[in-house]
Image: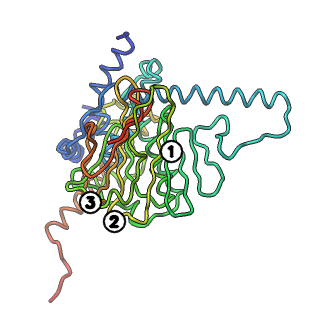
Amino acid sequence: MSDSDQIIDSAELRELRDSFSGVAMPERPRLEAIAARGRAHRRHRRSRAAGMSVAGVVSATALAFAVTSANAPAPGHSTIRTLAPGTIRTTAFKIVKNPNGKTTLTLNPNEFLDPATLQSDLAKYGIPAKVTYGSFCSSEPAPAGFSQVVSLPPREAPVPPQSGMQPTITFNPAALPAGTELSFGFFQLTGGGQQASFALIDTSSYSCTSTAPGPAGPAEGAQLVYGTHPGPARS
Amino acid sequence: MSRDETGFAEFFQESWDPCLRAVAASTGDVLLAEEQVAEAFARAWVSWRKVTRHPAPRAWVVRTALNAGASRWRRRAHELPLADHDAAAPSRETAMDSVLLTALRRLPARQREVIVLRVFLDLDIETTAMQLAIAPGTVRAHLSRAVTALRNELAQANTTETDPCPTATR
């Protein structure tokens, strides 16, 4: 047995391995969810490459100026923060802080959403949220007050697929009960489209699951289905 | 299903759990690890042909997951502090409070990486060295130092358990 094997079989490392084997691990997500996320990455890369090639053409024509609209992301970047005060825009979502203290989030159904980016951007506007992709966190019982914090667009008649409709969610951070935060769980639906589930959770007691809430949405929460599959709907 | 798709599906099925345990052991947060590992597998799906040529595909996933986590923390370091948010307590289900796991998280990053690759992914010394772009002898040295540190932490914890309040007086 080599020195290294002796080290690897040391009591400390065996104990480390054993102590970890007792920790419950979340279930493996569905392969389709990983593949959907991978496809979104691929689209993202292609759109970025296309943006960079546009930038190259612009520079080749020796334009001495560039006009960057405050509402349009610059080429070559998927997560550009626009500099308009109170606005963060990425290709996947836009967050706008309104003068009345409320904040609106607009989702782009055609882009991959990076949960960590959305979570950190919401935090900048005083909206603590646990944002997950392929899983959803909830508390049992769910804290009261969800409807004072989150407003979804009114239920609308189904619209044709490919409509490109971008759902907007409004938040009132001032109404967030102490000791709570929001939970956003995004799921890629089989055959296209996305589901976004929302709830309030107790920051000190919640659990997460990779099973998407059913069509009725989470208890004491709300849910949006949007994108190219069934058209925007809410529960 | 193409050969590539089948290969990825098998790899994903067999490797999810060991990769998740390795990343969770390194970060100490199962939920965060789950998100990072899912992200790493999505990237592996995109670059599957490249990953299959890698000498240790699981190590590729683990390193990608840990790098994704590091990027996230770098981003968060520039964010405005938000009272009572960033320090949210983990749920009981995800808490890992073993003395050794705590000690593992206290190790220098390189020693922790060696432990994760060598112990949790069961890579041999040479492959671990290749992964970390260091010499095999350096891997052995890191492993040895890590074991010593873990041994000391364990001994200290045992002493505290035996005599929880050695200086208390009436």
The CA distance from mark 2 to mark 1 is 23 Å
Q: In the rendering, at what x and y percent does residue A130 appear?
A: 37, 51
The residue indicated by pointer 2 is A177
Labels 3 and 1: the sequence-earlier one: 1
Look at mark 1 in the image and give the residue it sits on.
A106
Q: Could one spot residue B140 in this view of the protein? A: no
How far across and how far down the image is residue A51, in percent? Answer: 66, 30
Let me know if marks 3 and 1 both belong to one chain. yes
Which kind of residue does numbered mark 1 sit on? Thr
Q: Where is residue A60 in the image (x, y as percent from the top left)?
A: 82, 27
Q: Mark 3 near mark 2, Cβ–Cβ under 8 Å? A: yes
Chain of the residue that carries numbered disc 3 in the rendered image: A
Give the residue pinned by disc 3: A143
Query: Where the C terminus of chain A falls, by quadrant?
Result: top left
Q: Which amino acid does label 2 sit on?
A: Pro
Q: Residue at x 65, y 54 (%)?
A: A84
Q: Which chain carries label 2?
A: A
Taking B3 as reference, is B104 above or below it? below
Question: Do tags 2 and 1 sit on the same chain?
Answer: yes
Instruction: Measuring from the top left, give residue A165's x and y in whole percent.
Output: 50, 35
Residue type marked 3 = Pro
Mark 3 touches mark 1? (CB < 8 Å): no
Foreground residue, A101 or A30? A101
Crowdedness of circle 1 by 10 Å Cα count: few (<14), some, many (20+)?
some
Residue found 41% across the figure and 35% down from its top: A232
Q: Which structural element holds mark 1?
A: strand
Residue A30 visible to an observer of this rendering = yes
Q: Which of marks 3 and 2 is nearer the N terminus?
A: 3
| Outermost residue toward the front in this view | A157
The residue most toward the top is B2
Q: Label 1 lies in what chain? A: A
